[in-house]
Image (tube, rainbow, N blue to C red):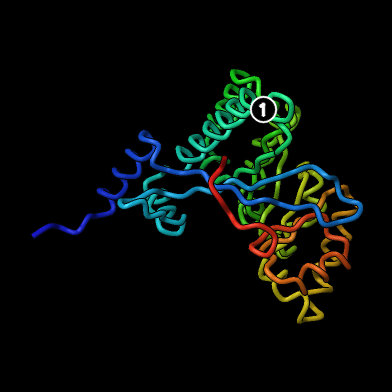
């Protein structure tokens, strides 16, 4: 009888996958919807794992194992490296508009706490001559609250280079807009759990409008997460939200 693979076996497979490029980068567009929003083009970088028979495993299937074995910072480094390589390839194939798109990369708490991660990003950018402005890093509201001091130290050396920073899943329950301003956050993703109810519940509409207004006052642009319906999009435009992301805007696809 074959033994069922244990966590260590799966972790070994994931480590081998990092070395063998079995992870695949996907991207989802973030579209400008506000009349006053900056027209910069953004896309969020997503990670998939290619199992046998070309089956793609979503992060929920492998992130917990990577976290358990302290491999998330390794994965984050791999993503940064591959995104920079993607920019280099675009520079060769489309020299006139290769850097028109800005890529937003999700960061784990391990990377925020890892002393060498900032140095790694800095060296990768320097070696590649890819503009730092092309990279943004996404941090959850939960991590911003839990690791506020560490995050400040993380952002401090990268911000002057031109890297951008995004807070995701924001509800305003954990982190104040004053703290966001102090950290130097560029963009804020409003929690999709609020966004999805905006056209049905007055409180959700009021909450989103309050978050957007507070962000406007301190120069942070807003992104609505998990936008799926036209009715939701209409309400977001009524408020003046800057950007929208979700299956109703654009579905994820391979980074090309």
Query: Where in the figure is residue 59, as x and y percent of width and height?
Result: 46, 55
Question: Which quadrant: the N terminus?
Answer: bottom left
Give the side of residue 72 with respect to residue 45, left or right.
left
Q: Residue 47 in the image: x percent, y percent?
A: 50, 48
Question: Is 141 positioned to the left or the right of 12 in the image?
Answer: right
Q: Which residue is mark 1?
A: 94
Q: In percent of the image, x 61 and y 58: which residue is there? A: 251
Of residues 217 and 176, the one nearer the viewer is 217
- The total of numbered circles placed on residues is 1
Q: Which residue is drawn at the image coordinates 51% and 40% (left, top)?
A: 76
x and y, in percent, of residue 223 in the image? 75, 56
**The quadrant where residue 107 appears:** top right
Judge left or right: residue 157 versus residue 3: right
Along the line of sight, the residue nearer the viewer: 156 or 4: 4
- Crowding near the residue tagged with mark 1, few <14, some 14–19, many ≥20 C-alpha atoms within 10 Å: few
Element type at mark 1: loop
The answer to whether any part of residue 205 appears in the image is yes
Q: Residue at x 62, y 41 (%)?
A: 150
- Check the image and name the residue furthest to the left: 1
| Residue at image point 54% right, 40% down | 111
Residue 109 visible to the viewer: no
Q: Nearer the viewer, residue 71 or 198?
A: 198
Q: In the figure, 132 relative to 218: above or below?
A: above
Q: Image quarter for residue 204?
A: bottom right
Q: Quadrant of the C terminus?
A: top right
Residue 150 against residue 159 in the figure, above or below: below
| Residue 56 in the image, given as x and y percentages of width and height | 41, 54
Examine the image and state in which quarter residue 215 appears: bottom right
């Amino acid at each position: 009888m074959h033994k069922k693979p244990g966590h260590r076996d799966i972790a070994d497979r994931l480590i081998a996958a990092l070395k063998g490029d079995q992870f695949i980068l996907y991207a989802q567009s973030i579209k400008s919807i506000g009349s006053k929003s900056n027209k910069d083009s953004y896309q969020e970088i997503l990670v998939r794992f290619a199992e046998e028979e070309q089956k793609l495993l979503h992060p929920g299937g492998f992130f917990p194992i990577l976290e358990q074995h302290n491999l998330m910072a390794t994965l984050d480094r791999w993503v940064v490296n591959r995104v920079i390589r993607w920019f280099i390839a675009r520079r060769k194939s489309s020299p006139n508009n290769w850097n028109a798109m800005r890529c937003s990369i999700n960061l784990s708490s391990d990377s925020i706490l890892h002393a060498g991660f900032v140095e790694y990003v800095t060296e990768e950018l320097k070696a590649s001559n890819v503009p730092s402005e092309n990279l943004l890093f996404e941090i959850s509201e939960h991590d911003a609250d839990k690791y506020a001091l560490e995050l400040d130290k993380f952002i401090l050396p990268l911000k002057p280079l031109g890297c951008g920073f995004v807070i995701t899943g924001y509800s305003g329950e954990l982190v104040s807009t004053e703290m966001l301003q102090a950290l130097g956050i560029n963009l804020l993703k409003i929690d999709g759990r609020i966004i999805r109810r905006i056209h049905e519940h007055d409180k959700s509409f009021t909450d989103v409008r309050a978050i957007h207004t507070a962000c406007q006052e301190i120069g942070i642009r807003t992104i609505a997460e998990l936008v799926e319906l036209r009715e939701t999009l209409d309400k977001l435009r009524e408020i003046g939200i800057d950007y929208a992301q979700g299956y109703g805007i654009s579905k994820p696809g391979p980074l090309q």
